[in-house]
Image (tube, coloured by chain):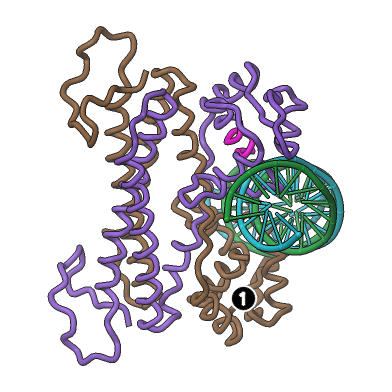
Chain colours: A purple, B brown, C cyan, D green
DNA sequence: CGGGCCATGTAATTTGTTACATGATTCC
DNA sequence: GGAATCATGTAACAAATTACATGGCCCG
């Protein structure tokens, strides 16, 4: 049940409403994803169990929640348990099956990945330049951001390399120049 | 509905049984995760809709399935749709909340991440050395493997860097030596 | 006064996990 | 013959998505 802890963790930093929390989980560079229809009931449950409490009521029925001491204790307890390792990356999954597509479609897919990760990197680097972390929470967000940057850089380099691995069909042979050998010599390109 | 396509994609390479598919989704370096209790019903559904068919029956009630032409077409169609981008990385999520833990616990967490990614990298590099991809499917698996390797390397470097950012409590100041400045100068370590 | 966003909720459905259940084969 | 692993399934529950539903506030 990680959504619960994600909500608690964000509320530990500052009081927020369900709507504001939803935006955090929907934003482009989101770390965790969830829809409002999952968040509102979860907030209700958290309040019932005393891990958060409503601290404000604004216009339009806005409810702002803050974490309680029990909530903070729960996050700390959670942080000491081993993290779940269930990875489910659909974009990455598809790479394994690109042999089913033609070289044309495969290249298009990789180009799409390249663009996506370039955009994300760009976004992260903007955040990084604007960043001036003062609070501990902001400092850890900054540390996490560095992971994002390194991650995106790695994937961009990979996508560029991968594009170089799949031949350009429709062009006479010789379109690509020397590819660095990698482990096994004479590795043939796909297709 | 990505599990469906993951199953189809694997069956496109070779006929497999539910049990064998389950192993693929449970293995350490798995790209997608699923339990047998989700896989068996999904296989039944895929068979009913004609995307796969049973091609063999072995001992112990083993059923081996193969993809059909319609199934292959469905994978190709899927590959042309934009990939889902729902990221949910619990281990990464926790980093944002490490300010709630003490420096001691934060360091321990990062050390855990470092170990985990080192082990994975080691595993991937072993696979890479053993790799001799001949079929197109194996070649794309190999290309995907390179992404994994770059990914793990990036995260290992990040974890090492991050460990250097959080002070070692219980030791007199001066335990750490010069940290490279990164963007903003004089950025203070956490806590 | 109308369009866009703020703001919250519930219901229906799908997806995923955990637990329950069973039995065959192989290897020692 | 007993333990490990192969092998498949169902049921109950939890988590997540999609669709339904409603209304207030703000700005032009």
Horizontal arrangement in the rendering, residue D9 relative to residue A136 (left or right): right
Q: Is residue B37 above or below residue A84?
A: below
* Label 1 element class: strand
The quarter of the image holding the N terminus of chain A is: top right
- Residue situated furthest left in the rendering: A178
Confirm whether the magenta stretch covers residue B101: no
Q: Residue at x 70, y 68 (%)?
A: B61
Return the x and y of residue A156 as percentages of the image width and height. 30, 59
In the picture of the structure, the residue carrying the numbered disc 1 is B65
Residue at (53% x, 48% y) in the render: B88
Residue drawn at the location 24% of the way across and 90% of the way down = A171
Q: Report x, y in % for residue A174.
A: 16, 86
Residue A109 location, x and y as percent? 40, 73
Residue for point 39% across, 19% down: B103
Q: Quadrant of residue B36?
A: bottom right
Residue A40 seen from this side? no
Please tell me whether residue B3 is drawn above or below residue B46 in the rendered image.
above
Predominant secondary structure, magenta span: helix
- Give left or right: position of A55 versus A158: right
Segment tinted magenta in the rendering:
A1-7
- On the image, which quarter does residue B54 sit in? bottom right
The residue nearer to you, when weighing A173 against A70, is A70
User: Which of the 4 image quarters holds residue A146?
Assistant: top left
């Amino acid at each position: 049940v990680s959504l619960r802890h994600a909500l608690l963790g964000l509320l530990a930093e500052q009081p927020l409403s369900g709507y504001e929390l939803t935006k955090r989980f929907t934003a482009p560079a989101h770390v965790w994803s969830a829809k409002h229809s999952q968040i509102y009931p979860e907030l209700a449950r958290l309040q019932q169990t005393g891990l958060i409490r409503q601290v404000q009521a604004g216009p339009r029925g806005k409810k702002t929640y803050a974490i309680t001491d029990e909530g903070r204790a729960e996050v700390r307890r959670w942080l000491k348990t081993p993290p779940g390792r269930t990875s489910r990356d659909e974009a990455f999954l598809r790479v394994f099956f690109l042999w089913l597509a033609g070289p044309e479609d495969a290249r298009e897919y990789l180009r799409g990945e390249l663009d996506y990760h370039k955009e994300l990197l760009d976004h992260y680097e903007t955040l990084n330049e604007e960043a001036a972390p003062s609070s501990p929470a902001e400092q850890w967000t900054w540390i996490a951001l560095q992971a994002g940057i390194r991650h995106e850089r790695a994937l961009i380099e990979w996508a560029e390399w991968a594009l170089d691995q799949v031949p350009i069909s429709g062009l006479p042979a010789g379109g690509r120049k020397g590819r660095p050998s990698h482990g096994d010599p004479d590795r043939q390109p796909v297709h």
